[in-house]
Amino acid sequence: MEDLIGRTFGGYELKEHVGAGGVASIYKGFDDRLSRWVAIKVVPIQSSSGTTEETMLARFRLEAQAIAALRHRNILTIYGYGEEEGYAYIVMEFVPGGSLKDRMEQGKFFGWEQALTVIIPVAQALAFAHEHNIIHRDIKPANILMPQDDWPLLADFGLAKMEQSARPNLTMPGQVLGTMAYAAPEQIQEGEIDARIDIYSVGIVLYELLTSKLPFEGETSFDFLMARLTEPPRPVKDANADVPDIFVPILDKALAQDPHKRYQTMTEFCQDLIEARFKLRRGLQGGPQETTTSVIDTAQLTDTKLSLKLSRSGEQIIKSSQSELIVGRAHKKSTPDIDLGPHDGAKAGVSRQHARFIKENGTWYLEDLGSTNGTFLNGGRIAPNKKMAIKKGDKVRFGQIELEFGLED
């Protein structure tokens, strides 16, 4: 495609070429009206080799519609779409931090905490997209932007598919969409696909972060693709013996060749990742517990008792001397210290491991633990994995359940 620097689309002047993918080019532009930089993705409307003009344009419009339909902290924001002078373009948020791929040095793996800091928000963003019947279909490190170390942004919905839609299939016969290193077996076979392909792709990205390797090998491209159709993935502990054992069953399930043996929803996958993080943080990973237990060490006690009351009814639901308490819902043999399940927690959008109260140096803090529907303090949302100081009388909300925080001697 010709160099478009200096051209103007939708009132945005293209200042710098910053990337490319397929037939699209991405430019950095400046919004004079709001004094901000934007990213502008441009494709020529004229037909290209192997793709009809109608198909290409329909796919590009679909990308704009897909992103515009999704408002989530970990999904790239779209500002506008247009077609003019033989080109179609999408105006998007500009992210100066580069992509996850840029941060993945060859031969160097991420620690488990760093890997989950990236993967859990991405999985939550995809769970949100799936709830809106949108499948991404091209999850890979290059499509995960990183404005901050702990803030991934999911981008490039150019291959997105609307589930349960009357839209035509925009994949040409014999054409497999998605980067093959991260594609699910059913994508390679051009079979029927659903949201479970995104689960598989996220599993490969997690595997690569933990090991710096891909779970399949092959001397040729054909061998590389066929390996995932005929062989199980390389055991993660073989790729990196230092990977915590808790990831073995998680990755085995996420990377199951048969989609019916995978996690059936991204939410289920995400919850297991969140639970793994808590167990690792507290040194409690290992075999199954004989009895239902809290994920917190109940030996940690304090003279001042924390209390919580339901705002609507005034009912006190807990009074505890622990200096650290997890808020969430019971699941299998893991029970949080503050179980909101009996208070319609599931309907209210409370995650299994939603938030925690922790006392440090005499001050109580509330931390969101990557919950799906948010943790709120006096009406303001707490950023995922961030702690906020809390005092007696403050209102806290987990999903849709509001409580009053109290302290008693």
Image (cartoon, rainbow, N blue to C red):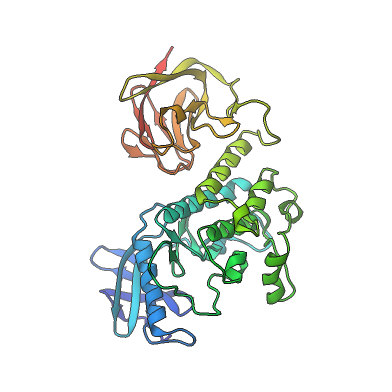
Q: Position of residue 156 (x, y in %)?
A: 45, 66
Pick the quarter of the image with the C terminus: top left
Q: Position of residue 106 (x, y in %)?
A: 66, 64
Q: Is residue 261 above or below residue 80?
A: above
Q: Position of residue 202 (x, y in %)?
A: 56, 57
Q: Nearer the viewer, residue 127 or 108?
A: 127
Q: Quadrant of residue 63?
A: bottom left
Q: Residue at x 45, y 80 (%)?
A: 23
Q: Nearer the viewer, residue 304 or 178?
A: 178
Residue 93 visible at all: no
Q: Is residue 359 above or below residue 141?
A: above
Q: In the visual, does 246 lie left or right of 326?
A: right
Q: Residue at x 47, y 50 (%)?
A: 124
Q: Residue at x 55, y 61 (%)?
A: 197
Q: Nearer the viewer, residue 287 or 208?
A: 287
Q: Residue at x 29, y 85 (%)?
A: 85
Q: In the visual, does 3 lie left or right of 265?
A: left
In the rendered image, the residue lying farthest to the top is: 409
Q: Position of residue 80 (x, y in %)?
A: 30, 67
Residue 280 visible at all: yes
Q: Quadrant of residue 390?
A: top left
